[in-house]
Image (cartoon, helix red, strand yellow):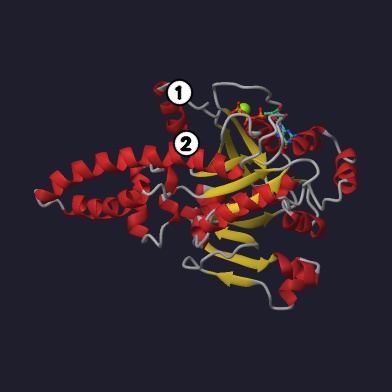
Amino acid sequence: MEVGIVGLPGVGKTALFSALTGIKAEGYSEKAHVGVADIPDPRLDLVAKHIPTRKVVHATLHLVDIPGVPAGSDARKLNSFLEQIRQVEAICHVVRCFDDGSGKIDPSGDITNMETELVLADLVVAEGGAEKSTKLAARGAEDAKARLAVLERAIPMLGDGRSIRASEEWSENERLILKNYGFVTAKPVLCVANVDEDDLEGDSQHAQAVKRYALETGAGFVAVCAKLEAELAELEEPDRSEMVQSLGLKEPAVGSLARAAQTVLGLATFYTTSEKEIHAWTVPLGASAPEAAGAVHSDMQRGFIRAECYHVSDLEQYGTEKAIREAGKLRSEGKHYQMEDGEVVRFLFNV
Ligand SMILES: Nc1nc2c(ncn2[C@@H]2O[C@H](COP(=O)(O)OP(=O)(O)OP(=O)(O)O)[C@@H](O)[C@H]2O)c(=O)[nH]1
Ligand SMILES: [Mg+2]
């Protein structure tokens, strides 16, 4: 799962990227930075607290820090920007809510600027697609008719300056068609209000404006001070925890951010345990038990027999796997079982 960090120039995308990945990247670069972020996970910590193991492995998020294009950039720069956004599965839209010395903080205006660029790009694609599909549909091609029906709904929305994402429900089939066109405004979005050091909770009117926009357009929302988080990421324990505490935070904000990104992406987490390692994995919500097994190893999916599961909260209540089994809370699930978020699983397989 790849998430693109997107926003106007100088809003703190690279600072956020550094905070999430621990990769020190500074200054403007025309090339995207790519990296992997561990997803901080209190439930994983809880599992590791109750089950002895040698190694704890976090689920990860793949991030691409896509450089912003300054207003009035040439078509080549703009196209390369859009092409990079088309490649990612979800967008993390960073909006500046801190004073960068210009004395001007205008999150709503910035969001409109960014969104207009993306909406226009989709409109060009949609109109091109409609022209083609009209011709094919006239010759009786059924799939072209289906595509045309979707595009005829998308075009007026885009013409109004609205993202495809913000629309009333699209059916699964329609979503697939939208995905094939690579529409950037159809991708799930997490809005990040990049706040000042003195507004860590995001209570300022600026951060709240970003939150309202997120709610209105079906996006997720978090407030983060990227600069501070990047500094936190550079510290070693126990210095980091001390600083987190002194700031009055429960955890570094990158934790809630990474988890919000997972929610926006529609992911569920499950855990596997052994003496060797405890491992957090992510799968799309609604994945079947064999599909989840496939995330661990393709052999496990191929030779899937059944899954033994319980919930992390059972571990909290009963303390050990043995006690969970004795309490009758250990379930045996077959190949049609749909995974729930937060399960500890042992896959039984035979290859
Ligand atoms: N005060 C404050 N400054 C920040 C914050 N986040 C980033 N900055 C500063 O803003 C400047 C730009 O940050 P970058 O992370 O380079 O911005 P960017 O979005 O990657 O910019 P481009 O790559 O040019 O598109 C840097 O000097 C950062 O230190 C923040 O939360 N608060
Ligand atoms: Mg940058």
Q: Residue at x 71, y 64 (%)?
A: 312
- Where residue 80 appears, x then y in whole percent? 44, 26
Disc 2 marks which residue? 85
Disc 1 marks which residue? 77
Q: Is residue 3 above or below residue 314?
A: above
Residue at the extreme bottom of the image, as rendered: 327
The image shows a total of numbered marks equal to 2
In the displayed structure image, the side of residue 215 where residue 23 appears, left or right: right
Discs 2/1, front: 1
Task: Count residues near mark 1 (Cα–Cα under 10 Å), then give few for <14, some for 14-19, many for 20+.
Answer: some
Figure quadrant, ligand 2: top right
Identify the secondary structure beneath mark 2.
helix
Q: Is residue 28 above or below residue 282?
A: above
- Where residue 220 appears, x then y in whole percent? 58, 53
Q: Residue at x 62, y 41 (%)?
A: 106
In the displayed structure image, the side of residue 185 where residue 224 appears, left or right: right
Q: Is residue 150 above or below residue 306?
A: above
- Where residue 25 appears, x then y in whole percent? 68, 25
Could you say which quadrant of the image residue 43 lies in? bottom right
